[in-house]
Image (cartoon, rainbow, N blue to C red):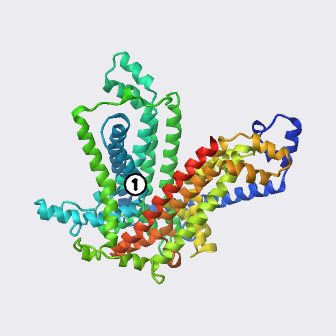
């Protein structure tokens, strides 16, 4: 097969003119070089480390083929207890997130309860704040003896002992729930908003009551959204590392991800770490397949309309009970954690009385001190975020264009390879990166950059590809007919038209890079610490005030990034329209 048939413009996307097709079918060296380089980078970022992960799980410490690695790994001390803890954590967090997110979604989308905008805002804030930062807030609020909520309960509410203990497995479940319930809330509320009113109206006309209509019409229509959200919550809880590492250290329990981290401490035991990570990968792959085919099975059910006023339930006297429920959620998931974080960051010491004389700025002065570890971590995080966002946006643009515009043998495999990284837990992926590149980039930011770029590339790819899908090929064709080469047509025509999508991808990847902990904890060294790993270090060392101050920096930058996303989203809309 000639190289001309490997890279040709897709006939569906260009003119039917034979002359034009003949012209476009020729190989352009720059185009071939750029696309080839992007594919090589993709293989190096994703295929190579995942293949190593599978391979290392089948060898012993001497590098010989061994099929008992799994047995030896899971028979290590505490491994089965950690497995049980992870299983229970996934079940409880999933149930709790659904119990919180689904009723809230129904209240916001289908009732006349007041204060619904506050629920949406609180869910957004909860989603932005990583769980390892929530740990800092809730230690301040609900530590067994020194937490301020416990002090208030004992001093003013008549409790004989502290009612809350965040340093427990139950505390971990609570923190994980408030961190992932927004996944359920946003998915279900969006589905409820978009349910075609005619379906429910037809059921009511035929005599079905509101409850029967909900169970037989509304629920089946939003079931794909619920299923997708449940799977995302399960995978998030299974791969969670930050909160379990912080709380488990103090409460003396482990989960699978913290055990993987322990196996990579000096001397690293790659084969056992890979073996323990493999079940997580299998569960992830099975979950994604279930999601794909279960949702596909629901495709005959459509969401084509918008929720109308007739679909809004008038709660009557229950209206204020629903509002009270919303206020409690807003207070517990957003107001309390953010307020506690800000207060703790300026309090002279943990446990000190909240008075003006005890409010200081020394913690911020220390974390920005040039000789302190936090200052270096801030610089490292910003450099990594800038580099990761740029790499992912650029690579996402090239790969998105290839998949949408080029007839290329194996282009569907590109999409699969990009998206498979998104499904695998960060800590398992980091193990593969460490095994693949530790000899080349040990102790450098490059090693962390490789991991960040591979894990976050799917986000940029999806956003940019969707933007390219919305574009007509007419302008690109016109540019090439006028003599512009491939690179110039992409630079002068395609990129300006998808600039909004590229901008959203860039700022979103930047924000997610700042808060990435799981991969950073495994790959960073003393000179390559990032903000999340330093926060965990402060927590483990008992420097909760410093952890709070550095967490405020992360949250502030993350919220600022949300503003940039809104800005670029408006720009994208303006360009498309």
Give the image location of residue 127, x and y in percent.
42, 53
Mark 1 is surrounded, within 10 Å at the Cα level, by few (under 14), some (14 to 19) or many (20 or more) other residues, namely many
Residue shown at the point (40%, 73%) measured from the top left: 537
Residue 26 placement, left or right of 228: right
Q: Give the position of the C terminus as an image quadrant.
A: top right
Left or right: residue 400 versus residue 301 is right
In the depicted structure, whether residue 250 falls above or below residue 499: below
Q: Nearer the viewer, residue 113 or 413?
A: 113
Instruction: State the image coordinates of residue 307 (x, y, percent, origin top left).
Output: 43, 31
Above or below for 256 versus 181: below
Relative side of 50 to 268, left or right: right
Q: Residue furthest top?
A: 206
Where is residue 362 shown, x and y percent of the image? 36, 79
Image point 37% across, 16% down: which residue? Answer: 205
User: In this view of the protein, can residue 219 be seen by the observer?
Assistant: yes
The quarter of the picture where residue 322 lies is: top left
Q: In this orientation, which residue lies closer to the viewer: 86 or 449?
A: 449
Q: Is residue 425 visible?
A: no
Corner quadrant of residue 197: top left
The answer to which of 147 and 435 lies nearer the viewer is 147
What residue is shown with label 1? 125
Mark 1 lies on a secondary structure that is helix
Q: Where is residue 119 shown, x and y percent of the image?
A: 35, 47
Q: How many marks?
A: 1
Residue found at x 68% / y 60%: 41
Q: Residue at x 35, y 76 (%)?
A: 361
């Amino acid at each position: 097969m000639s190289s001309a048939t490997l890279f040709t413009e897709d006939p569906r996307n260009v003119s039917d003119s034979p002359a034009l097709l003949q012209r476009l079918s020729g190989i352009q060296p720059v185009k071939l070089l750029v696309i080839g380089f992007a594919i090589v980078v993709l293989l190096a970022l994703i295929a190579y480390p995942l293949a190593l992960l599978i391979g290392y799980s089948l060898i012993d410490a001497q590098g010989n083929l061994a099929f008992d690695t799994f047995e030896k790994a899971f028979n290590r001390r505490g491994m089965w207890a950690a497995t049980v803890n992870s299983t229970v954590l996934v079940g409880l967090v999933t149930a709790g997130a659904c119990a919180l997110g689904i009723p809230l979604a129904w209240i916001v989308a289908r009732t006349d309860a007041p204060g619904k905008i506050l629920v949406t805002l609180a869910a957004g804030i909860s989603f932005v704040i990583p769980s390892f930062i929530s740990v800092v807030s809730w230690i301040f609020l609900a530590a067994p003896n020194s937490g301020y909520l416990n002090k208030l309960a004992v001093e003013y509410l008549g409790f004989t002992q502290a009612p809350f203990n965040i340093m427990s497995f139950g505390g971990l479940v609570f923190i994980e729930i408030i961190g992932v319930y927004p996944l359920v809330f946003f998915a279900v509320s969006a589905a409820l908003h978009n349910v075609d009113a005619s379906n429910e109206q037809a059921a009511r006309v035929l005599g079905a009551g509101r409850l029967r209509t909900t169970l037989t019409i509304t629920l089946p229509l939003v079931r794909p959204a619920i299923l997708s959200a449940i799977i995302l919550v399960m995978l998030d809880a299974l791969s969670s590392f930050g909160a379990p590492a912080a709380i488990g250290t103090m409460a003396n329990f482990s989960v699978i991800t913290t055990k993987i981290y322990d196996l990579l401490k000096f001397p690293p035991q790659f084969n056992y770490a890979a073996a323990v990570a493999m079940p997580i990968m299998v569960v992830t792959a099975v979950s994604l397949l279930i999601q794909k085919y279960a949702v596909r099975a629901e495709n005959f059910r459509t969401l084509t309309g918008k929720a109308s006023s007739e679909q809004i339930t008038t709660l009557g006297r229950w209206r204020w009970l629903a509002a009270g429920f919303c206020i409690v959620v807003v207070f517990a998931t957003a107001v309390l954690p953010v307020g506690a974080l800000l207060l703790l960051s300026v309090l002279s010491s943990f446990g000190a009385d909240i008075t003006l004389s005890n409010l200081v700025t020394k913690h911020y002065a220390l974390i920005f001190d040039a000789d302190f570890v936090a200052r270096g971590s801030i610089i490292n995080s910003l450099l990594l975020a800038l580099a990761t966002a740029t790499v992912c946006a650029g690579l996402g643009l090239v790969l998105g264009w290839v998949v949408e515009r080029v007839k290329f043998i194996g282009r569907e495999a590109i999409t699969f390879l990009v998206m498979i990284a998104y499904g695998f837990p960060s800590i398992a992926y980091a193990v593969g990166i460490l095994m693949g590149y530790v000899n080349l980039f040990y102790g450098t930011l490059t090693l962390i950059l490789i991991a960040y770029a591979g894990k976050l590339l799917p986000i940029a790819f999806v956003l940019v590809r969707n933007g390219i899908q919305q574009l007509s090929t007419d302008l690109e064709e016109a540019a090439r007919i006028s003599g512009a080469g491939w690179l110039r047509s992409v630079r002068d025509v395609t990129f300006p038209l998808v600039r909004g999508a590229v901008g959203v991808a860039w700022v979103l990847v930047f924000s997610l890079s700042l808060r990435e902990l799981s991969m950073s904890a495994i790959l960073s060294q003393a000179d390559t610490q990032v903000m999340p790993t330093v926060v965990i270090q402060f927590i483990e060392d008992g420097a909760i005030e410093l952890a709070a101050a550095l967490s405020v920096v992360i949250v502030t930058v993350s919220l600022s990034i949300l503003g940039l996303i809104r800005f670029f989203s408006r720009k994208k809309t303006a360009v498309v329209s």
